[in-house]
Amino acid sequence: MKKIFFTGGFLLFIAGITSCNKNLLNSSPNYEYSTSNFWNSPAAADAALSGCYSVLTSAGLYGGTATPLWEETASPNAYNYDNSDGWNSIAEGNQSANTGGILTSRWNDCYAGIGRCNTLLVNVSKVPGMNPSDIAQMKGQAFFLRALFYFNLEIYWGDVPLILNPPDPASQDTLSRTPREQVVKQIYTDLDSAEALLPWKWGSTDVGRATRGAAMALKSKVLLFEASPLFNSNNDKSRWQTAADTLETLISSSANTGYGLFPNYRGLFLPENENNKEVVFDVQFIYPLEGNSFDLIDKQYNTNAPLLGLAQAYEMKNGLAITDPLSGYDSNHPYLNRDPRLYATIVYPGDVYMGSKVTPSRFAITGYGVEKYSIYDSAAPPAGLGDLKGGQSYTNYIVIRYADILLMYAEAENEAVGPVPSVYSAINQVRERAGMPDILPGLTQDEMRQTIRQERRVEFACEGYYYNDIRRWMIADSVMNAPIYTYNSTEIEVRKFDPNRDYWWPIQQAQLDLDKNLKQNPGY
């Protein structure tokens, strides 16, 4: 197989007949494709698979201008001052069936990806000249991607239509919402199929393809969501144990997967270190075929501006919170001797960035900027666009990384049995990579729970993870109903989060108008 390039999909359409010549009715134009003449070679099948992957770079998922970076702004970590893609409407609790933006694009793009995967799964076995092992591996990748698309639907909307056949408006424009539990069951089935069909590793010419380890990792993430308070109201410990056991199996499979922590936290997010051992699954951006705007958003537009609360969440270098009287925190020098991850993630007043000392006006919205997922740091960039290619960023977005596997395991095991030694070990591995001391021994289960949540917040800050963390922990209504502040404690706004409504997104009115059998989520 050839390397996957996420640069657009394949087109399946039936040509219009524009002539009265009856012979045209019995021929197929050689410059247009339909389902009857597309699946005629292994190259066509590979193009179709590339089309499945290409949806990952869309605005509703991990590409667009800066979708994953903006998702952080729906959490207490960051602020989107101009409501890019509707994220600040979500943060303010003002989303509605007519908000648009991400609420429209994520639904549409996920179903576009599902349609492509379904089409491939039905047709790839019919391709003449295909090696059976290639067919199996293509199906495995399509199963993984379909599971990922459905995961991105059910965790935001709950019940969604479950479609397992190729696109067919005649039969699919009157579908009702399938119970979320049934959708999740299908996700598990797809990931089990992917795990059985995919290799542990691909060769150097197949970078970016889903692997058996990626299927196990995504299944672990789904299991953790299902065990969390959002979906596990009676705190069924067996759900936590299932998640912990699955994650433990993945961790113990390192000899096969090759996964581990990349030694340099800052370097993990730079293009020269892409596809390193910490990357479980990422979205490939390759200049000039496909780019994003991560660098421009970070250095210029600041629509993912960090907030004071995030800066204060980082511990001191000695492992104590800044509120601890023994920590050595100096309010006159608030960024001195802090967790090194702060310096690799946030640009703060007094910092040196792009060759200049940062003043509060440099990032006028909150006083803070973002360094993570950007090539820019303290060094002055070359003239012009520096290392950017044609104005595009091309750093891959990491959907799942090994640090997430470790911290998910710590969380699941702590919830299942308590703070046993393996929980400490998983957390301390992540902290030690960052240059932080081990956590103190002797924690209670609740103390460990809060420690893990704190660790997730700073380890994954500005990666777009935290919004879903506070939702699945069901603490969004307590941490979002609060003011947000700039670097100097100036209040920006008071956010709102309705616990009876806002844990789920509204289905857009355009979808409700198209399909009268769709029912809206409560409160919208």
Image (cartoon, helix red, strand yellow):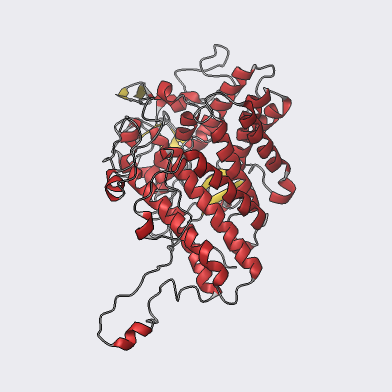
- Residue at 38%, 38% (x, y): give it: 304
> Where in the figure is residue 293, as x and y percent of width and height?
39, 50
Residue located 40% across and 52% down the image: 109
The residue sitting at the top extreme is 325
Q: Whole-percent x and y of residue 450?
A: 56, 21
Quarter of the image that includes the C terminus = top left
| Spot occupied by residue 246 in the image (x, y as percentages of width and height) | 67, 39
Question: Is residue 340 shown left or right of residue 370?
Answer: right
- On-image quarter of the N terminus: bottom right
**Residue displayed at 44% across by 18% down:** 332
Residue 93 can be seen, yes or no: yes
Can residue 338 be seen by looking at this rendering? Answer: no
Image quarter of residue 445 = top right
In the picture, measured across the screen, residue 193 lies left or right of residue 490, that is: right
Image: 29 above or below 125: below
- Please state the horizontal and vertical placement of residue 94, each as a whole percent of the image: 29, 32
Along the viewing direction, whichever of 442 and 194 lies nearer the viewer: 194
Q: Is residue 269 above or below residue 485?
A: below
Q: Is residue 524 above or below residue 25?
A: above
Viewer-proximal residue, 151 or 83? 151
In this figure, what is the number of numbered marks?
0
